[in-house]
Amino acid sequence: MTRVLLTTTSFQDTPGAHHDLLARTGWEIIRARGPLNEADTLALVGEIDGYICGDDAITHRVLEKARPRLKVLSKYGIGLDKIEVKSATEFGIPVLFTPGVNHTTVAEHAFLLLLALEKNLLFHTDSTRAGGWKRQTGHELLDKTIGIVGLGRIGQEVAIRARAFGMKVVAFGHHFDEAFARQHGVRRAATLDELWAVADYVSLHTKLTSATHGLINAAALARMKKGVVIVNCARGEIVHTADLVAALQSGHVAGYGTDVLDQEPPPADHPLLRRPNVVVTPHIGSRTYESVVRQASAAVTNLSLALRGEKPLAQINPEVAVKKFV
């Protein structure tokens, strides 16, 4: 029987049609609670044919142990920074992913974080739940400028929602859809420095790569407007935590709303967890009933097609041919 490892918790914990789809495959499902570190992942691979993963550490060592039995990696989601794709390609293991399934959900979450900060939501709810009636003055989004770093699917959805709030939108990205920008009134920044200089809010929607690791650092923060608010629904490592904390303490950065951290789960003493001008959610930006069903169904379909030797919906290393595995 085909044995498949399933580690993503949102897949497992959210009811929906994806469970029926998985059951109909007839696979033997090995379940674990991710995201797994390298040691935990190593302990589970070696006797599996397929792997539906979340943000587990899938390193060269993991892939080396997993082969030759592991035929396919099917990522639940779009972020591939925890998978050593180069090693998977070297070992002839296709890496599949699910683009286009969570962009609306993540864009909505970005505005949840932004509004929570600008309307002092946590302060007010804490006050009323404690029996108080304390109030702080917030800010409107109207006529403010939002700078979007990365104008892919999620960045575009953020731009659409920003325009609905009456905001000005400036964006920077190496893959820039000019037709979309014209249609939705998005101004292109030629450089990140140009974006930093004009943005009241900075919203991060770019991949984690060697070039973007630590992108938001002391130098970048110094070029931003005093009182800027930063929203991160991308990856925690894009932000240099110590530099951000210093900017939050000085008041140069007025607030930070993030769904991701450089350590997940974070230690109890993580410096961003208890700051009054920071809102942290536990990497749940794409965890809605609608999005989970889309992502999970796509991940199962990808794996099923590949194991049958058919073309998957989306593959990150197409140079690895999908072979007839059964």
Image (spheres, grey):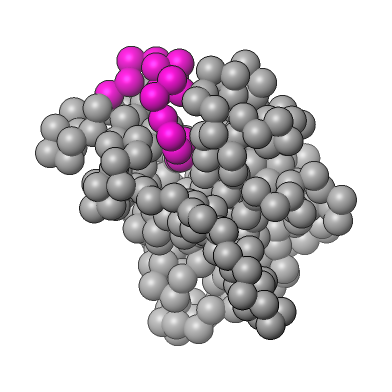
Q: Please give left or right for residue 276 compared with residue 74 in the image.
A: right
Callout count:
0
Pick the residue in front: 132 or 151: 132
Give me the residue at 29% from left, 41% from top.
Answer: 143
Q: Which residues are magenta?
A: 188-205
| In the image, residue 193 lies in the stretch drawn in magenta | yes
Residue 117 visible in the shown view: yes
Above or below: residue 10 compared with residue 260:
below
Q: Quadrant of the N terminus?
A: bottom right
Residue 87 visible in the shown view: no
State the image coordinates of residue 61 (x, y, percent, origin top left).
77, 40
Give me the residue at 62% from left, 29% from top.
Answer: 252
Pick the residue in front: 131 or 302: 131
State the image coordinates of residue 168 (x, y, percent, origin top left).
28, 37
State the image coordinates of residue 309 (x, y, percent, origin top left).
40, 55
Pick the residue in front: 96 or 17: 17
Give me the residue at 40% from left, 59% from top.
Answer: 108
Give me the residue at 24% from left, 47% from top.
Answer: 166
Above or below: residue 266 compared with residue 298:
above
Where residue 194 sits, quadrant-wise, is top left
Pick the residue in front: 137 or 111: 137
Above or below: residue 47 compared with residue 206:
below
| In the image, residue 320 lies in the stretch drawn in magenta | no
State the image coordinates of residue 14 (x, y, percent, origin top left).
53, 79
